[in-house]
Image: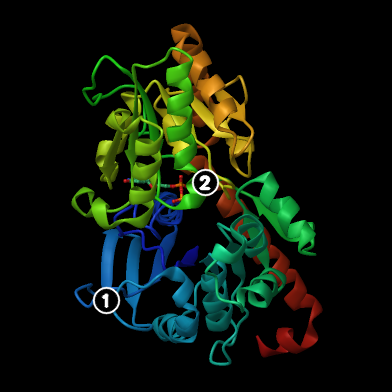
């Protein structure tokens, strides 16, 4: 198949851990590579966010990234990109010329708009099937972030319109299906394919980052309030009161380490730690390149993922793949990926006391940590390899192509145009 991916803000080539560079970048990169390895021809279209970027970057013989001129050639917050989606669609359809792909797959609601726009242009004589993965949904974000949600107002009607207009939606977890259903979307048009893990990079064997004899708790991700990193800091002080004073919290993510002093969320978290008297137990590592992540995961006794909400969450899978137990807030995709008392422990969201209790249980029981870690590795191996996820995605594409071909047969006007 000839496949076009559209990922307006999340380039597969970007460094991870900054405010707008996280799971979606990993997802688009790894899914595209796995599809290319399965024999498909994949092109990823993303917005040019630096004047230095070449127009095309070939990653594999059958995978390339195309940087489309759409708005200023500089990094902009993703919530400011809506005005440039028409230009992104122009660039995509120009690149297609008269040889459109078999399927176009939009990532995030704005890319869905550009994908639909490019696919439905009059210049293209055939119906290009559009598949959409939302990665995050506006109603969920609004519910949790309220006035702090910086999404453009138009998201409220454009995102549901994308959901209604595309040929198929790929949800990444069951919670997302419920949310889409609540938006009035027909669930027969939804497939589920989770995010995956690079099981060759993230594995139990391999280098381990040296650490002190203190227990190590690890938090990995973009430094934004909704990731709930402050809960891990609050749990540290509760753990200390419970007799676990020898515990280090390593916080990875949030831009270049040298510039963390200027990062509002890093400063807020540091102030929380100082106020609770645990600042000496907390290390801010800043952004870490992907290749160094497995060694850091392997050095931890437990990985904490306690976001307010989480559309999917790749970090817990990476931890599980490395054999490390996860303490996860029971929200969104984490309810599917982390099995409570199987591969980690669930805690209620925004509950530092429950988090501290779960961590105390793990830190006090090496055997439990080992058993949960082993089960996590096994779960990732059988369920979350990118090859398996790419296979599920491929099935969703084929299903979409067949459904579109059927509807064309039933539609005499479009059928005649072919
Ligand atoms: N990540 C990284 N270096 C960092 C911080 C994060 O490589 O300094 C990676 C992390 O390993 C994971 C991704 O960024 O692969 C974050 O994905 P997740 O789905 O957990 O969160 P999102 O950013 O999508 O909300």
The correct choice, above or below, for 221 with respect to 370 in the image is below
In this rendering, does residue 102 appear at all? no
Q: Is mark 2 within 8 Å of ligand 1?
A: yes
Tell me the residue at 48%/65% (across/down): 3
Q: Which mark is residue 195?
A: 2
Q: Is residue 400 left or right of residue 250?
A: right
Q: Quadrant of residue 46?
A: bottom left
Tell me the residue at 58%/78% (across/down): 116
Residue under label 1: 55
The correct choice, above or below, for 82 with respect to 102 in the image is below
Decide which of tag 1 and tag 2 comes sooner along the chain: 1
Q: Residue 366, how many percent across, how many down?
A: 44, 9
- Closest to the camera, between mark 1 and mark 2, is 2
**SS of the residue at dot 2?**
loop
Q: Nearer the viewer, residue 371 or 383?
A: 371
Q: Nearer the viewer, residue 380 or 360?
A: 360
The correct choice, above or below, for 106 with respect to 100 in the image is above
Q: Residue 386, how many percent across, how many down?
A: 46, 43
Between the residue at mark 1 and the residue at mark 2, the CA separation in whole angstroms equals: 28 Å
The correct choice, above or below, for 138 with respect to 359 in the image is below
Q: Nearer the viewer, residue 160 or 346?
A: 346
Q: Is mark 1 within 8 Å of ligand 1?
A: no
Tell me the residue at 38%/83% (across/down): 70
Q: Is residue 153 left or right of residue 413?
A: left
Q: Nearer the viewer, residue 277 or 268?
A: 277
Q: Residue 312, how many percent across, how many down?
A: 56, 46
Q: Residue 223, how many percent across, how many down?
A: 39, 50
**SS of the residue at dot 1?**
loop
């Amino acid at each position: 198949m000839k496949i076009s991916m559209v990922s307006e803000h999340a380039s597969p080539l970007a460094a991870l851990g900054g405010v707008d560079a996280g799971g979606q970048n990993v997802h688009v990169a790894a899914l595209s590579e796995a599809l290319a390895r399965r024999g498909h021809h994949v092109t990823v279209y993303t917005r040019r966010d630096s004047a230095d970027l070449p127009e095309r970057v070939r990653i594999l013989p059958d995978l390339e990234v195309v940087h489309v001129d759409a708005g200023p050639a500089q990094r902009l917050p993703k919530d400011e990109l809506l005005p440039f989606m028409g230009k992104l669609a122009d660039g995509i359809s120009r690149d297609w010329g008269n040889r459109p792909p078999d399927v176009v797959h939009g990532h995030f609601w704005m890319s869905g708009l550009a994908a639909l726009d490019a696919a439905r242009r009059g210049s293209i004589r055939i119906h290009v099937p559009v598949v959409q993965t939302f990665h995050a949904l506006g109603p969920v974000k609004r519910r949790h972030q309220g006035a702090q949600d910086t999404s453009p107002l138009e998201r409220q009607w454009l995102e549901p319109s994308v959901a209604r207009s595309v040929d198929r939606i790929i949800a990444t977890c069951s919670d997302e299906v419920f949310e889409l259903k609540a938006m009035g979307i027909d669930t027969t048009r939804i497939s589920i394919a989770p995010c995956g893990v690079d099981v060759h990079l993230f594995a139990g064997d391999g280098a381990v980052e040296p650490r002190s004899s203190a227990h190590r708790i690890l938090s990995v991700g973009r430094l934004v309030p909704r990731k709930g990193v402050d809960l891990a800091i609050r749990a540290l002080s509760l753990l200390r009161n419970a007799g676990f004073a020898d515990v280090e919290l390593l916080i990875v993510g949030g831009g270049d380490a040298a510039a963390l002093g200027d990062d509002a969320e890093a400063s807020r978290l540091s102030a929380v730690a100082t106020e609770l008297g645990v600042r000496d137990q907390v290390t801010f590592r800043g952004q870490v390149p992907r290749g160094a992540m497995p060694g850091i995961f392997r050095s931890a006794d437990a990985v904490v993922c306690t976001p307010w909400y989480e559309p999917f969450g790749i970090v817990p899978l990476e931890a599980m793949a490395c054999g490390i137990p996860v303490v996860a807030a029971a929200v969104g995709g984490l309810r599917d990926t982390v099995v409570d008392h199987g591969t980690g422990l669930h805690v209620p969201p925004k509950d530092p006391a429950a988090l501290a209790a779960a961590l105390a249980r793990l830190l006090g029981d090496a055997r439990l940590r080992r058993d949960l870690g082993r089960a996590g590795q096994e779960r990732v191996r059988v369920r979350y390899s990118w090859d398996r996820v790419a296979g599920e995605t491929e099935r969703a594409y084929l299903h979409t192509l067949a459904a579109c071909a059927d509807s064309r047969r039933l539609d005499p006007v479009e059928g005649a145009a072919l």
